[in-house]
Image: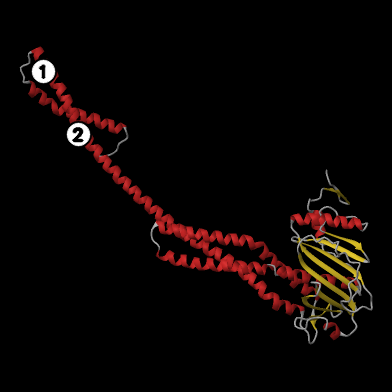
Amino acid sequence: MANVVATNFGLFEPHPLRATVLGEVHARPFSLVAAPRIFLHYAFEAGRATGTRDRDYFDDLCRSQGQPPPASGARHHIIPFGAGTLKWERHAEFTTYSWDGPVSGTRQPFDEMPSTHPFGISFVPPGLLLVAVRAELLPDTGDLDRAAALFDPASLCVCEVIAGRAIALTDFRQDGDGRSRILVLDKGLNTREAGALVQRLLEIETYRTLSLLGLPEAERVGPDIRRIEQELGAITNSIRSSEGLDANRKLLADLSRLSADLEAGSAATSYRFGASIAYDEIVRSRLGVIGETVVSGFGQWSSFLDRRMGPAIRTIQVTVTRQRNLSEKLARAAELLRTRVDIDVEQQNRDLLQSMNRRARQQLQLQQTVEGLSVAAISYYVVGLVGHLIGAIRELVHFEMDADVATGLTVPVVVGVIYLVVRRIRVSHGDSSADL
């Protein structure tokens, strides 16, 4: 038995997905860290081709640091880099690189960047940049106002997290290097709490960015949905007054065209919309996990994101709902029109059958007339033959009866016989029509 696992219960063949399922709970590991420390986090768009190039690059990067590359099929890998650690993660549609390293305990927030990080000119990005974050975990000095002054006051968000053992600050804006900045002031976190908190904050920034990718798509397809809605309204009004097979078929063709337009747009956006809604749920989940509480005089992360992201996500949700409802309306209208077209076709077929029946009846009447004439014609020729026969017999046997009288007397008999013969032929052909 291949791939057998030895256990205390005997030998079992594992399910082919067992290792994947068991490993999923460890797919997003966080580091055990302590203040002071800096974090650089990047997320890149990753398709099939770029993913292959990225894996080759990361394998070479691991070897250059004297570290083994990730196993085949691995979705995350951590290696030492410089004085810190570099974490690589493969997601469904993006790849992340996260580096963290120690900094001087006397440094001020967002001072000069350490030179030991991997994101220099030699770094090869796997795809288009989506997210760039610089986060710093520093000891709390008690001067919150000084730390807050480093951010844009218009969008500054400050909250206590992890039961008040840390303070997280951000303004969700890019600095001069194009990175969002997050500052975490440590008020007594252990290494596990610190590592988990920073990872959650980086995920919030990552997924809130990714969730908004659906908004441009919603704005793009919005005019098409509105056009289809308007045309559907016009077609629905026309259905009430349309008559005739040709008119209903034209309306049905118009509905089919609208359905094709809608389904094409829906197919092109369904993944993006679904991903945006899912990412938004992840953001809300991470905000709930960090347990933010209000810091007097400052806005909360969740409140800010709800105000700024909420309308965008609701726009996406409304667009999805409009697409679904419009698809149902188009299906109902098309079903109604198909029913009317079927009725028109049945009426047309019935009229055609009635016309064919009339023509068949006329043909039958004509045939019966022809058959009546044919009986007379055949009888005429048969009577003529009988007349010749009587004349011949009269000469042979010197029969004194007038030949014309004898011939005339045979007429009813001949006509009756011919009629019966024709009738038998008709019966043998399955003709159940009225007698001639």
Using residue 143 as the reference point, say whether residue 430 is left or right of it.
left
Which residue position is annotated with label 2? 373
**Crowd tier of the residue under label 2, counting other residues whose Cα lies within 10 Å: few below 14, some 14–19, many 20 or above:** few
Report whether residue 30 is seen. no
Q: Which quarter of the picture shows residue 37?
A: bottom right
Using residue 353 as the reference point, say whether residue 36 is left or right of it.
right
Disc 1 element:
helix
Which quadrant is home to the N terminus?
Answer: top right
The structure residue drawn at horizontal position 76% and vertical position 78%, both measured from the top left corner, is 301
Report whether residue 274 is seen. yes
Using residue 377 as the reference point, say whether residue 201 is left or right of it.
right
Disc 2 element:
helix
Q: Which quarter of the picture shows residue 268?
A: bottom right
Residue type highlighted by circle 2: Leu
Q: Nearer the viewer, mark 1 or mark 2?
A: 2
Which residue position is annotated with label 1? 391
Q: Position of residue 160 (x, y in %)?
A: 82, 80
**Colouring of the image:** secondary structure
In the image, 177 versus 184, the foreground residue is: 177
Q: Which quarter of the picture shows residue 419?
A: top left
In the image, 262 versus 362, the foreground residue is: 262
Q: Position of residue 79 (x, y in %)?
A: 90, 61
**From this viewpoint, which residue is outermost toward the bottom?**
297
**From this viewpoint, which residue is outermost toward the top?**
396
In space, the residues marked 1 and 2 are separated at their CA atoms by 27 Å
Residue type highlighted by circle 1: Gly
